[in-house]
Image (cartoon, rainbow, N blue to C red):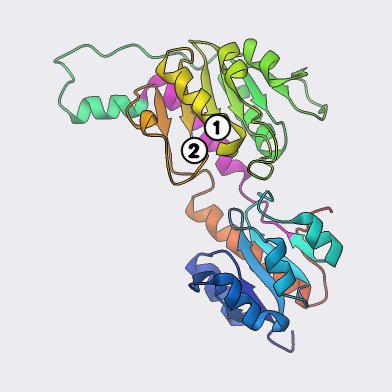
Amino acid sequence: MNERPDIAVIGNQRPHTFALLEARFTVHRVFEAPDPLAALRAIGPRVRGAASNGMAGLSRAQIEAMPNLEIVAINGVGLETTDLDAARARGITVATAPVLYDDVADLAITLALSACRRIPQADRFVRSGLWGKQPWPLGRKFTGMRAGIIGLGRIGTEIAARLAAFKTTIAYADPVARDVPYRRYDDAESLARESDVLFLAAAGGAKGTRPPIVGRAVLDALGPQGVFVNVARGWIVDEAALVAALVEGRLGAAGLDVFHDEPSVPPALLTLDNVVLTPHIASSTEETMRAMGECVVGNLVSWFEGKGALTPVAM
C-alpha cells in the first residue's frame, strides 16, 4: 500500500490489534466517542475500511455514514449484528475471523463436564473447609452419555469430534443434512428427547427476529436428568423458560456462556447450584484473541493491496 487508508473502528479491538492497524492505516476509534454515529458521520466520506467485532457488527446507519466504504473486517464470526442486506446492496465486502472454533468447542465440553461433575461447587466445597465435615453429593458420569448437538456447523462439528473421545452416542439437528456418521433429527425437541446432554451451537440470527430455538418444549424433552449447554447466543433460548426449568427441577443442569442481555444475568441463575456460568469467554484465550486480531488486520491489508479479503463471507 502506498497510502494509509482511513479505517473506522466500529467495535473495540485488543491493544495488539490496534498496534497492527495503526502501523498500516489511519485509524479512527469512533466507538469511543460519546456519540459514535455522529463521530462516524464527521469522517465518513474519508473512510474506505472498517473494523468491528461480532457483538458490535455493522449497522445500516453506519454503512450510510460511510459512502466510500469498501470492506468491513469483523473480529469474530457472528453476523447477527451486521446488516448483510445493506452491505450487499452497496457492494461492501464483509470478512470474519474464523479461527475460534477449537476454543468454543473446548469450552462447550468444559461446561458439560463441569455441570455433570459439579466442578464449581466442588471447588467451593473444598475452599469453605467442608471436606471431611459433610458428605459430597454424587455427580453424573459424562462418558457414555447420549449427546445431541443443535447446529452442526464448524463449531458443532468440533464439539462432536471431542465428544467421540468420551464414547458418547452423537446425534444432531440442523436444517442441512451433513455427511457425518451421526443420526439427524428433524427438530430440536425430538433430538432433546433422545439426549442426556444437549449442546446449542446454532447460528444466532439477529436478536428478536425469530422464535427461540430452545424453549420449554425442548427443555422438558431433555428432562430432569438432562444437561443443557449453550455456547451460541443467549437470545436463541427462551431464557425465562430455561430459568424456570432449572428452578423447578424439570431440567437437571446447565452450562451457560451466553445470555439474553449480556452482561446482565437473571438473578435466579446466580443462586442455583445446578448451573455453571461463564462470562461469554468461549473464544477468550491468548492464542485465539491474537489470531483473530491478526485476521482482522490481514483482511484489511490484503484488501488494500488489491488482493481481496482473506476470509470473506459468501453473500
Can you give x and y, in whole percent of width and height, for residue 32 in the image? 49, 71
Identify the main secondary structure in magenta: helix
Image position of 111 with respect to 262: above or below? above
Q: Secondary structure at mark 2?
A: loop
Could you tell me how far apart the alpha carbons at marks 2 and 1 are, in whole angstroms?
Answer: 6 Å
Q: Residues within 10 Å of mark 1 (few under 14, many from 20)?
A: many
* In the foreground, 57 or 159: 57
Mark sitting earlier along the chain (2/1): 1
Please tell me which residue is depicted at 70% across the width and 31% down the height of the picture. 151
In this rendering, would 127 be left or right of 10?
A: left
Residue 158 screen position, x and y as percent? 65, 35
Residue 181 is drawn in which quadrant? top right
What range of the chain is rendered magenta? Answer: 95-118
- Is 87 on the left-hand or right-hand side of 118? right
Instruction: Check whether the beta carbons of the residues at disc 2 and disc 1 lie within 8 A of each other.
Output: yes
Q: Quadrant of residue 105?
A: top right
* Residue under label 1: 230
Indicate whether residue 96 is drawn in magenta: yes
Amino acid type at circle 2 is Asp
| Residue 193 among magenta residues | no
Amino acid at the residue labelled 1: Asn
Residue annotated with mark 2: 257
Q: Residue 285: x percent and y percent?
A: 49, 50
Task: Estimate the x, y position of residue 96 in percent, counting from the top left.
Answer: 70, 56
Observer able to see residue 168:
no
Q: Is residue 160 left or right of residue 48?
A: left
* Residue at left offset 55%, top offset 75%: 29
Depth check: give the residue in front, 42 or 181: 42
Task: Work out whether residue 90 can be spotted.
Answer: yes
